[in-house]
Amino acid sequence: MADMGRRARAAADAVRLAGPEIRSAALSAIAAAIRDGADAILAANAVDITRARANGLSEALIDRLALTPARVAAIAGAVDEIAAFPDPLGVETERWTRPNGLDIARVRTPLGVLAIIYESRPNVTADAAALCIRSGNVAILRCGSDCLDSSLAVHAAVVEGLVAAGLPADAVQLVPTPDRAAVGALLTGLDGNVDLLIPRGGKSLVARVQSEARVPVLGHLEGLNHTYLHAAADLDMARDIVVNAKMRRVSVCGSTETLLIDAEAAGRLLPPVAEALIDAGCELRGDARAQALVPAMSAAAEADWTTEYLAPILAVRIVDGLDAAVEHIRTHGSGHTEAIITDDAEAAAAFLNAVDSAIVLWNTSTQFADGGEFGFGGEIGISTSRLHARGPVGAEQLTSYKYVVRGTGQIRP
């Protein structure tokens, strides 16, 4: 692990100083190598899935792990999108001239060596590699044991693309062991060679990284996301959005986990929305008022308001107005993504202003909490931190900045 850190640091300058054309060429070559290696990637994924089922992994988590020809093609397509994304390095975000004639510019620059720890999603191997290269960073990737074979196969394609473009293979390294001690080594910073840790996984992983890391951490807590049906919500819109927000893919962090319904319109909205959810295969757990309107709903326990299910389960609560919805989100949410469904623009504005999560939405699905959907070309995760980057973390958010000052001989009096 220490050697990986040293090799990553040695590769950092080559990636940073390579022109944007070289970084783009590397990404295009990576996408091509993923397509060419699809059979090998799928074969490795089959090994992972067999092992996961033998270990009793839930079907929802196996869905996050599983690859198909279409998903492999989508992984390559995402890398192509990142290749086409404007290179953020060297961009002047602001420039001004002081009264003494000094010309000062703020210019984007890479963060350096990023250690990214993630769990059962092999597509993150390609996404993380591509975003790091696009932003001029290098990466040390540590995947979960569930997706190790898949990730090794994807990583082989990444290295093939890097080398084809003339960048060092060490620009993206993958920890080749499931040994948990590797995570502990990353948390130490590998003798000062890791500049930023990014955990992407469950609450326990993120909590461990945040509590034990000796280097800065970009936090990505669980998605305890809420959709609030305001009294002025349109029924058809509410039904379509809620079913999509919960059931499109229950295993993603943008899935709605709690549905809040305004008491004023609960009788009009909740029964048909609940019926559509149940028909889609969703289990509902509600408070007493919600159960009274939908008898098929089971009783919610206190833990349901703070559970990221990542499964076809939805907590349901009736609230007395917008302020009560905001208070529930403030008390139980994780600061990830919240939505309001309403035809009342003033209510929407009040909700968007009052809720201080990384992403707030009006009349749309929480499943849009995704860097690709934001036009970022991909994401490393949804940051719930308040410093450096917040929300979808794409290539631009993986940069810092430096000040470039140009003078004509000025000296300070």
Image: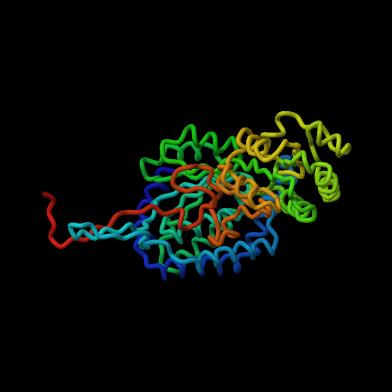
| In this view, 23 is above or below 119 | below
| Residue 265 pos. (x, y %) | 79, 43
**According to the image, what is the colour scheme of the structure?**
rainbow
Judge by depth and name the residue closer to the eye, 308 or 284.
Answer: 284
- State the residue lying farthest toward the top: 302
Q: Give residue 77's quadrant in the image.
A: bottom right
Indicate the position of residue 374 as horizontal and vertical percent values.
57, 59
Q: Quadrant of residue 314?
A: top right
Q: Residue at x 52, y 64 (%)?
A: 82
Q: Position of residue 294 (x, y in %)?
A: 86, 39
Observer-nearest residue: 371 or 12? 371
Question: How many numbered marks are there?
Answer: 0
Residue at position x 37%, y 63% from top? 91
* Residue 47 in sight here: no
Q: Quadrant for residue 411, please give it.
A: bottom left
Residue 372 appears in the figure: yes
Specify whether 10 is left or right of 227. Answer: left
Which quadrant, please, contains the N terminus? top left
Residue found at the far right of this picture: 295
Whether residue 196 is situated above or below residue 78 in the rendered picture: above
Q: Position of residue 216 (x, y in %)?
A: 42, 41
Along the horizontal axis of the image, is 311 left or right of 386?
A: right
Residue at coordinates 50% horizontally, 64% vertically from top-left? 160
